[in-house]
Image (cartoon, rainbow, N blue to C red):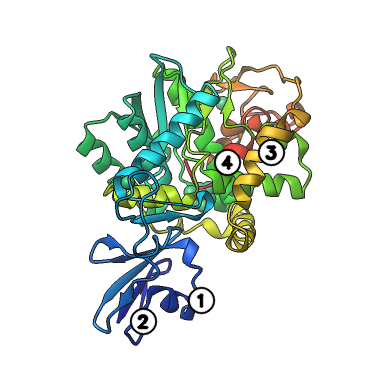
Amino acid sequence: MRVKLRNPDRELHVAGPRKVHDVLIELGVDPDTVLVIRQKALITREERLADDDEIEIRPVISGGSNPGMKCKRCRGPAVIEVRRHNASFCQECFEHHVREQVRRAIKSHDMIRPGDRILVAVSGGKDSLALWDVLLELDYRVSGLYLGLGIGEYSDRSGDVTRAFAREREAELIEVDLRADYGFDIPTAGRTGSRSTCAVCGLSKRYVFNRTALEHGFDVVATGHNLDDEAATLLGNTLRWDTEYIARQSPVLPAREDGMVKKVKPLYRLSELETAAYSFLRGIDYVVEECPLVAGNTQLRYKEAMNAIESRSPGTKAQFFMGYLDKAAHLFSSEDRATLTACEECGQPTTGRFCAFCRARAQVLGRTLLAPEDLQTVGELSEEVLPAELYGTADRS
Ligand code: SF4
Ligand SMILES: [Zn+2]
Ligand SMILES: [Zn+2]
């Protein structure tokens, strides 16, 4: 049979007939981290494949349920198994399950108030598009924000799928382009600035999300961070005992009158597997490819470590992160709040004279914001108010 693998794209021939599960094991693929697709439909890991079958193995999506498994909610035939919940669902009930998890997240953390206008930061990936879709389905007042990062074909395709999504649903999409609006792109910034590529990318995203929301009068910025992102970030913060970052790892960062819009993560109760399966089942065309600059992203290592534990002990990720929220978050919280003033260059909130974004941009463009005798003590980047560990390193804008 012909097997198409993604990231990187390649094709293999495997002899049949055999079970999906056996093919995955032979290829060294963890069945819990992929979706198996045949003729545009999800197939289960127990399914038998014929010698002339063609399948696609798509990363970070579940392999589906066992044949004959019944939907937990309606007892119809299941299409997807969520091992963490020890449950299988048919398509309709799975979509209901995803929306229900988002609804619970919003309610339990008071993420969105009646009448709020929400700006979803959309990257073209499965998480942010799934989030936008769910919020539209739940009838929220929601618009999308796409930030063009200038990362070659990857950004071109991300922009295209985001625009197509908005067009199909007649949803408002606001676009900001780093090169057109701010004079630089991420690959150039990574090469010329003193920060790593992902650091300057995360910084730019946080800046543009907050600024755009303020300028357009949005009440809330929503990002597509999922349970895997949050568990991996918490693991990284804990391994370093970065207590300040741990303290701020909340599904909600409240608004501040001095220029910070409320930030929420309504997908934090859903795994990457669930958001990917949701996007697939909803027919959402999303960018499967990874960002070509992802190699420097340290969060991936923590994700791999968490996946290794999760495959042996399903539910660990959820216990780790939800347990932190329920039992430990209050132990780390602190009331300390840096005072924010307007950046002298752009007017956005900062703890110093110039915000981190303006300083990074000036460096990339070869401009000087400060006289040499006027150098402020660095280390005060606006990461203090929008920590990179929360909004920067993950590729989930
Ligand atoms: S991996 Fe994510 S954070 Fe890093 S450059 Fe690519 S999009 Fe930006
Ligand atoms: Zn059902
Ligand atoms: Zn500024």
Q: Residue at x 33, y 37 (%)?
A: 133
**Amino acid at the residue labelled 3:** Tyr
Say left or right for 340 vs 91: right
Position of residue 49 in the picture relative to residue 149 (left or right): left
- Which label number is shown at residue 190? none
Query: Is 170 on the left-hand or right-hand side of 266?
Result: left
For discs 2 and 4, the disc positioned in front in the rendered view: 2
Image spot of residue 334 (x, y percent) = 76, 24
Residue 237 at x, y percent in the picture: 71, 44
Q: Quadrant of residue 50?
A: bottom left
Sequence-wise first label, 1 or 3: 1
Query: In the depicted view, which residue is nearer to us: 187 or 269?
Result: 269
Report which residue position mark 2 lands on: 18
Q: Find residue 392 and name its label.
A: 4
Q: Position of residue 299 (x, y in %)?
A: 61, 52
- The reply to whether residue 73 is in sight is yes
**Does the residue tagged 3 have its C-beta within 8 Å of any atom of ligand 1?**
no
* Residue behind mark 3: 324
Q: Does the residue tagged 4 have its C-beta within 8 Å of any atom of ligand 1?
A: yes
Mark with earlier residue (4, 3): 3
Taking the spot 48% from the left edge, 30% from the top edge, the residue there is 104
Amino acid type at circle 2 is Arg
Nearer-N-terminus badge (2/4):
2
> Which of the marked residues, 2 or 3, is nearer the chain's N terminus?
2
The residue wearing badge 1 is 28
Q: CA distance from mark 4 to mark 3?
A: 21 Å
Quarter of the figure that contains the N terminus: bottom left
